[in-house]
Structure formats: structure tokens, C-alpha cells
Amino acid sequence: MQSKGTYLFKGITHLSLIVWTVISIFPLVWMVSTSLKQRNEIFTNRSLIPNNAFNLENYKDAWFQGNFNVYTFNSVLYSVIVVVCVVLFASLASYAIARLDMAVKKVIFLGFMATLMIPIPGAFISIYLVVSNLGLANTRIGYILPLIAAALPVSIFILKTFFDEMSRELEEAAIIDGATSFQIYYRLMLPIARPALATIVILNTLSVWNEFMLALVLFSENRLMPIQMGLSVFVGQYTTQYELLMAASTIMVLPVVLVYIAMQKQFIQGITSGAIKG
Amino acid sequence: MDASSLPSTKGKSYGNRKKIIMRYFNLAYVLPALLLFILFSLLPIIRTVQYSFTNFNGVNSNYQFVGFKNYAAAITDTRWWEAVGNGVIFALLSLVFMNTIALLLSVAANSNIRGGKFYRVVFYIPPILSGIVVGYIWKWIYEPKGLLNGVLRDIGLDQFTHVWLGSIDTALYAVAVSSMWQGVGGSFILFLAGLQGIPKDLYEAASIDGASRSQQLRYITIPSLRKVYTLVNILTILGALGIFNHVYAMTMGGPGYATEVPALRIYREAFTNSNFGMANAFSLIFGIMLFILSLIQLKLSQKKD
């Protein structure tokens, strides 16, 4: 039995969802639309369709003259190295914390978790100072190491939770067969932890890809900068080359959105577990 | 379980010694993580505290300890408190508008509606973008001759056109709209996860008793969401107070200091004014404020349970 009120409720429900869908997507559509327009039309042509459809000049200019080939290479490099190291270091650490008999285990785990609970928004200043004291300011490694360190606590938390919930039967069988603790980690725990590792890979790739603040304070040379900093090349104090800025933004956003749509389940899971943390 | 704890043909004391050695040997597993963590997470925190009592300028290592001078200056700095005030405005706007929109959308998407999964995917697109890109897209929309003013002119609402990011009256709210646009999806996903955890038979029982939709929302949904609500509120407050990228991309704190926020002030104090001592004092004061805020939120939510 459907009452009038139910229909009204359903109508409002549908309408609000559709309205927010449009609001969510429109700025991105506008970004892509601007990136396909020519400089002389971006302020005058307010339709989504460019006068000259499939004009990819802006992409060419952003990629070569705007050096986005360099920035994209840098960001891919930083993402891959950080994520590989985080997966390796976090899985080793959380395996030991969850499964092995280890000295000062609790202190170490609580230490990692404490930085999740105490936010220091200005920490980037002291990280800059530590990095430059080590002589690593304006180097790739000086950017990569703090990013790995920053990613470890959440990753260790996610993996430790996963290992805690695993049954010990397989491990016990392996121990009887004479496996060492490292063999158990490598042959048994890592393959089983694949879903949790996928979460960590997604969470950290996204955060390195989107990282801006640390790059801002650490890099002074364009050839080392990641994409988020590269965007500022098109922004002048008085004029901004919006058609190039939007083309470059599209280059950065497109892979993220495509991967997200392909793997949305792991994505949402990854980010919610990243948000929930402790 | 450890290999050495299994029955061994060797003597008991040997087994014990091996066990103790293993306890320390196993530290090798955490060593890489621990070293990086100490060097780039713990040491910077200690440095923050240390430098906040000095007049360090970031370069010259001949700095002096100045006691609580930076803290005294920070606490009486009106521009700092205005920046904090702007952060608070962002937080309040987000709590009221962003989270209400997110809550209503999550209720809508959870109501057995066709395409519920599609909406979930679409609403979460803005949160996966970087604040910098979002800032630039909205800066482009807000341009004096940009889309927003153009559309207003097209539909005959000339009197509502503004220099959105360039005028003191609108800049702060314009930036807030961009950050809330991005943030709705995050709160939405968490609310939705909370809603899916409410048992369905509660609603069935209520509708048999003749409770209307809005009554069900008020007496079942909202009370059951309290825990999620606290989490979302904490994340919203921390996110809004810590905002940096949107402001950096859109206004750089301007016009004047109308959109300056704490993180931007800390950044400028260090890298524009070369006053690292003061920047670290701000940073620590702000960190403690955020920590106390999230503790209060947690305590409040536990009290109600």
C-alpha cells in the first residue's frame, strides 16, 4: 500500500540525489570544458561545448611547455617509492607487533598510534628543519622519507587489525614444519593480507599524489616538484592562464577518477578506514 | 606463537635464553619503520617544542632561548586570533551546512532507492581530489568575469554579481563553499556506513505503530547515529580548522587578511617572516587547541550513552 506521502517522499529523495549529483560533477565538467577551449573564448563562451571541439593544444602546451611531463614523472616516482616502502615497512612492523614475541612491543605500538591522536598542523615546519639539518632539503629523498614516515601509523594500524583477526592455525602448522618467522611473514602472512595491503596502496597512493604542503616547503627547483606544485606555474599574480591550468588539472584528476571508478569498493573502504584511524 | 616456545629436545634453560634473544632479535622487523618514524615524526614534534622557546630564524644557528616570549606574543596577536576565528567560521559552516546536506543525502541514498550505489560512487568523487585542484577550479568559477558572475548576468541578476574572492564581504564564504563542496562526500560516506548498521526491524516496528517518516528520522535514525555523528563532527572540525590548500590556491589569505587561517599564518610566519620560533609557538598552541577540542567531543559523546 503506497500512500500519497510515500510518493512525495520518494520524489523528494530522488530529486535531492539528482541535484547533488549535478553539483558534485559540474565543476569537473567545467574544468574539462575550459581545458578544451581557446584562450580567446574562455571568458566569453559560457557553454560547455568549445567553439573548436577536440582542440588539444592546451594539453600539449601544459605537458611540454608547462613541464607537466616532468611533474607527472616526479609524482609517479614519489608515489611508487613511498607506497612500496610503506607496504614493506608497515607489514614487517605490524606482523611483529601482532604475532611475534617482541621486546617493548606495547610502547612501540602506542608510540605509532599517539601521533594519530595528536594532530600538529604546523609539523611541516619542523619536518622542513629536520630535513634541511640532514642536508636533504630540495632533494627527492628528503621528500620521500618524511612521506613514508607520515604514512606508517595508519598503515600499521590497518595491518595490525587485520593480522589480529587472522586465525593462527596455518602459522602453527608452518612452525611445526620448521618455517622461520620471516618465512611465515613472506610466504603466509603477506599473501593472506592482500585485501588490507590493497587498502594501504590506494590510501597512500592517493595521499602522495595529492600532497602539496611538504613539497611547497621542501622544493625550490622545478625539476623535482610533484604535480600539485606544478599547477602554480600557470597562476600569476595578476593573470592566470586558466585554459592551461584546467588542462593540467584534468591530467592530474583523470587517472584518479578512472582508478576510483574501477576500484570504488577498495577506495571507499581505504579512505573510511584512513579517516576512522584510532 | 614463537618457534622457541614449542617443545624442544634441548634443555629448558637453553630454550629460555633463545627465547629472550629472539625477543630482541624480532625488533629487526620494526626497525625500518621505527627509525623513519623517530626521525621524521617524533623528532619534528620535539623540535617544535624546542624551537618555540627560541628566536630561531631558520638559517642562523646562533639563536637564543627567549623563554615564553613567543607564547606571550602569540597569545596577544590579534591577527592570529582572527585566523583562528576564520577557521572557527569554516568549522561552524561545515558542521551546519555540509554535515546536514551529507546527512540528508545519506538518508536518501539509504532508502532502498534505485541507483543508490551510483550516487554513492558519484558523491565520493570530490573528496578524492586534492584541495589545490579544487581551489583552482573554484577560483576559476569565481573569477570577476567567470562563470558565476556570467550566469548571474545572463539571468538578469546583475545586482548579485561580486568580485567573490576579492571582496572582504564574500571571500571567506566563497572559500568555505569550495571546501564544503569537497567535504560533503566524506561525511556522506561515514553517515551512510552508520545508517547501514541500524537494524531494519526498528523501522518496521515504528511504521506499524504509525510513526511518520520524519518521526522515524528523529526518534530512530538520529539517535542511532550518535557515534558516527561524533566521529564525523571531530573530522569536520579538525579538517576545517586545519584548512590550507584551498586558501593557498584561492586567496593566499586575502584580501588583506580576510581569509587567513592558522596553517597559512604558521607557514608565512616561518617562510615569509623567517620567524621559526614564533611559527612553532603558534603551531603548538594550535595543536593543543585541536587536541582539547577532540577530547571534549569524545567526552560529550560518551556522556550521552
Image: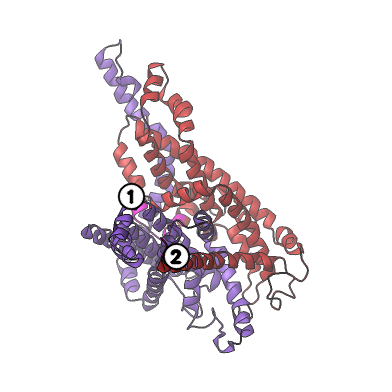
Chain colours: A red, B purple
> Which residue is most to the front?
A1
* Dominant SS type (magenta): helix
Residue span colored magenta = A115-127
Looking at this view, name the residue that lies furthest to the top: B9
Residue A29 quadrant: bottom right
Residue B171 lies in the magenta-colored region: no
Q: Nearer the viewer, residue A170 or B292?
A: A170
Toward which corner of the image does residue B296 lie, by quadrant?
Answer: bottom left
The answer to whether one can see residue A131 in this image is yes
Residue A120 lies in the magenta-colored region: yes
Residue at coordinates 28% horizontally, 16% vertically from top-left? Answer: B14
Could you tell me which residue is drawn at 75 percent across and 62 percent down? A56
- Measured from the top left, where is residue A69 in percent x and y? 69, 54
Which quadrant of the rendered structure holds the N terminus of chain B?
top left
Vertical relation: A264 (above or below) A55 = above
| Disc assigned to residue A114 | 1
- Quadrant containing the C terminus of chain B in the rendered view: bottom left
Residue under the image location 37 percent in, 55 percent down = B195
Mark 2 or 1: in front is 1
Left or right, B175 with reference to B67: right
Q: Looking at the image, which is closer to me, A153 or B264?
A: A153
Give, as a three-letter code, the residue at label 2: Asn
Badge 2 crowding class, 10 Å Cα cut-off, few under 14, some 14 to 19, many 20 or more, is: many
Do discs 2 and 1 belong to a common subunit? no
Residue beneath label 2, please? B57
SS under mark 1: helix
Percent of width and height locating residue B16: 27, 20
Residue A8 located left or right of residue B4: right
How far apart marks 2 and 1 lie (CA) works out to: 29 Å
In the picture shown, does residue B17 fall above or below A196? above
The one nearer the camera, B245 or B176, is B176
**Which amino acid is tagged 1?**
Ala
